[in-house]
Image: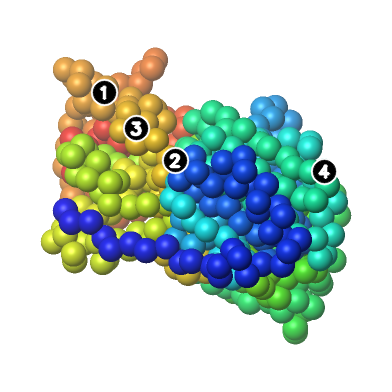
Amino acid sequence: MSDFAYSYARPSALEQRPDGNALLLSAFAEEGLNAETACFFWGRLRNSWLAARGLSTLAKVVASRFVPQSAALRDPIVTAGAGQLRFEAFSSCNGVYARLDLGPEALDGEFLSSGTTNVDFNEPMVNALARISRTEPVLLSVGQQEVVLERAAGKVVERKVALPERWIKGLTSVQAYLALMEEKLRLTRAQAIQLVQSIPAGSAKADYYLVLRGARPSFTPVASAGAVRVGGVHRLRLLDGLLPLCEAVRVYATPDGQASAFVLELGGGQRFLLALSADVWRGFSGEGNQLETLMDELPPEWVGGANRLFRGNEVFNPTVFALEHDLAPATVERLCASLSAMGLLGFDLAENQHFYRRLPFKLGRILSLNPRLKNARALLDAADDVQLVGVGAGGRTEVRVRGTDLWHTVVVGAAEGARCTCPWFSSNQGQRGPCKHILAAQMRYR
């Protein structure tokens, strides 16, 4: 494999900034925050007040929990490179994914290298963001070990923390859903404000559907043609403070209604995305929507070689990658799934393209974070845990697979899709990925 050509988008020269900003920049430089070995980006936020509103909304997401028993986790992921910064986070229940993108127009600084880090959003950072005024100069530094926000009133430093494995599982499912989504609606700023006003009161127990009644968006409990299913619609209140500030909103959904997303165009190179799982109780980390693609292992050197080609936020185009490296589309699909299973791939809905994260490259995560896949391979390793019963018309294959306490009947190759008699399949009907018994049957008898 040959390296892709890569270059950073450079903002305007630092010396052209106003004197007030220059003083803060000098402080950054004196402390060594622009050292290439430690710092990915340092510079000024062109519209610091708007960026602060986006980051405050992100902090609101990470502090939220829509399932009572979920653990409190507050670990935004920050990726720098390709002339932009991406801040990503999940709600503590893992059913809401949010991302703030700051493009070249939003930044006035230098990208010294590319990479990804993850920090907590603690009270000092949340308070500092809330106090940023409309014309206040603010500097931001993103490095391997810390994120620093500096104002005239002082600075806040958030240190790197361990990234929860649950977040990596969530990133895998989210990018798979986003890559399947289609744009359903496009709303103006006035309609975005109406959208806030139309969110039903209380915590929604049932699905709601977003529709346009004339020019006004509204939510209804009745499905109809062209309506967008929004599970747990009350979760959209996370956007209360941001929707009135946006220039437009794009609404997306997967064809099967298993996830929805709202992309807020904030202007000035800023964009905010909020994605919702199908139901409040469903976290993205448990979806398993890439398990079938991961059934066939790729040689480790292929996956490692692809990882070495890409830097933080660089575009990953599967079609171009396949053509440039003479790979079959199915092989590149498996490569994408493998990289995604390690949390290395994201998806930008507005640009309709994958982007890369520079998280630690750990092939072992593919199995350790996908226990259904790991257990399916264990079933295949046993002498007689997967047994062929018979093959019928149209390739319909019936298989007996050993369960924890009893044998399960699995049908694969049928026109209506794979089926299993286990409790997991009975509860989810394939909407959250296949069970381990279906995976084992497919791997042996496809």
Among numbered discs 1 and 3, the one appearing first in the sequence: 3
- C-alpha span from label 1 to label 3: 24 Å
Residue at label 3?
362
For label 3, the SS is loop
Which disc is residue 127 wearing? Answer: 4
> Depth check: 14 or 411 in front?
14
Eyeballing the image, is 45 above or below 311? Answer: below
Rate crowding at label 4 as few (under 14), some (14 to 19) or many (20 or more) other CA atoms within 10 Å: few
Tell me which amino acid carries mark 4. Asn
Q: Which residue is mark 2?
A: 37
The amino acid beneath tag 2 is Thr
The structure residue drawn at horizontal position 28% and vertical position 52%, both measured from the top left corner, is 309
What separation in Å lies between label 1 and label 2 (alpha carbons)?
46 Å
How many angstroms separate mark 4 from mark 3 (CA)? 36 Å
The amino acid type found where label 3 is placed reads: Lys
Could you give the CA–CA distance between mark 4 and mark 1, rounded to whole angstroms?
52 Å
Total label count?
4
Upstream in sequence: badge 4 or badge 3 = 4
Which of the numbered marks, if any, corresponds to residue 5? none
Q: Is residue 406 above or below residue 386?
A: above
Say which residue appears at 84% left-offset and 59% top-offset.
Answer: 133
Outermost residue, bottom side: 214
* Residue at left offset 62%, top offset 40%: 31
> Closer to the camera: disc 2 or disc 3?
2
Above or below residue 206? Residue 321 is below
| Quarter that holds the C terminus | top left
- For the residues marked 2 and 4, what is the alpha-carbon distance in whole angstroms? 30 Å
Label 4 vs 1, first from the N-terminus: 4
